[in-house]
Structure formats: C-alpha cells, structure tokens
Image (tube, rainbow, N blue to C red):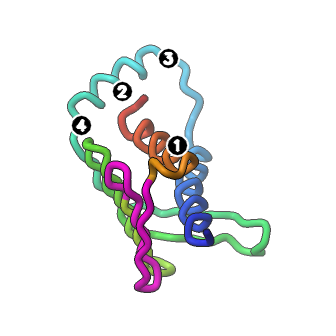
C-alpha cells in the first residue's frame, strides 16, 4: 500500500508541478484542433523531467529527476534517477513498480483507482 501511495504522489506531483507554469489559453478551439491533429500522428514521447513536490509533512521541497517515456499503445515508463532510483511501468492493464530492488506488479483492471490513473495519464498524452 505504501508503494502505491508513493507512486500516486509522484505521478500527481508531475501533473501539479507542470500545471503551475501554464498560462491561460485564450483561443481554445484552435488549440484543440491542433492537439487532435498532432495526437493522431504522435506515436511516442521521450522526455527528461524534473518534479518538485511540496509536502506538508516536510519543511523543504522534494526534487526528483528522471526520464519519461510514452508509447501510443498504452505504455508509460517513468525512470526516477534522483534522489533515488525508482521505476514505474504501465503496460496495458499492468502496473510494475521497482523500488530498492523490490518489484511489485498489479493489475490495473482489478484496482479501480489505478485504472482511472492510467486513463488520466493516457488522456494527457493523446490530448483527450
């Protein structure tokens, strides 16, 4: 359970951090049309990321860095390199987490909350 909570906080932290730097979109229809067009042709995404989390239980911010991969067939991979090595892989309906050399695999279809998380991440990638 602790691993799931850590994973969720990491994933949501990325979304929250990115949302802080966004500007208000004025011409939404133009943006939506372009996003839909680009999403149809996009097959994969690879990116470095920096995630900054502000947690109430800690007095300082927590900064993580790593690589993010997305493949259109529903595959997501997040490799955390700093401050610790941590791996999250979503492959269709399975979630794999590797932390401190310990691997855990769970079915996303069996866990409604994690299934919704996968849907949200996929929707972000395809512009839905």
Residue under circle 3?
Answer: 27
Q: Residue at x 44, y 75 (%)?
A: 86
Q: Is residue 80 visible?
A: no
- Where is mark 1, residue-wise? 116
Q: Is residue 127 above or below residue 113?
A: above
Assess whether mark 1 and mark 2 are in contact (beta carbons under 8 angstroms).
Answer: no
* Residues drawn in magenta: 90-107
* Residue drawn where x is 78% and y is 66% of the image: 56
Mark sitting on residue 42: 4
Query: Quick check: 123 above or below 59?
Result: above
Is residue 116 or residue 120 the one in the foreground?
116
- The residue labelled by disc 2 is 35
Q: Main secondary structure of the magenta part?
A: strand
Which element type, helix, strand or loop, lies under badge 3?
loop
Residue found farthest to the front: 110
The quarter of the displayed image where residue 3 is located: bottom right
């Amino acid at each position: 359970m602790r691993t799931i909570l850590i994973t969720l906080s990491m994933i949501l932290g990325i979304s929250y951090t990115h949302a802080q730097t966004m500007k208000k979109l004025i011409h939404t229809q133009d943006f939506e049309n372009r996003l839909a067009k680009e999403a149809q042709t996009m097959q994969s995404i690879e990116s470095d990321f920096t995630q900054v989390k502000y947690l109430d239980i800690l007095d300082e911010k927590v900064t993580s860095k790593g690589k993010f991969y997305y493949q259109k067939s529903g595959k997501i991979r997040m490799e955390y390199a700093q401050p610790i090595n941590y791996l999250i892989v979503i492959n269709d309906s399975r979630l794999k987490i590797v932390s401190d050399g310990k691997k855990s695999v769970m079915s996303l279809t069996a866990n409604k909350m994690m299934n919704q998380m996968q849907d949200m991440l996929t929707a972000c990638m395809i512009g839905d």
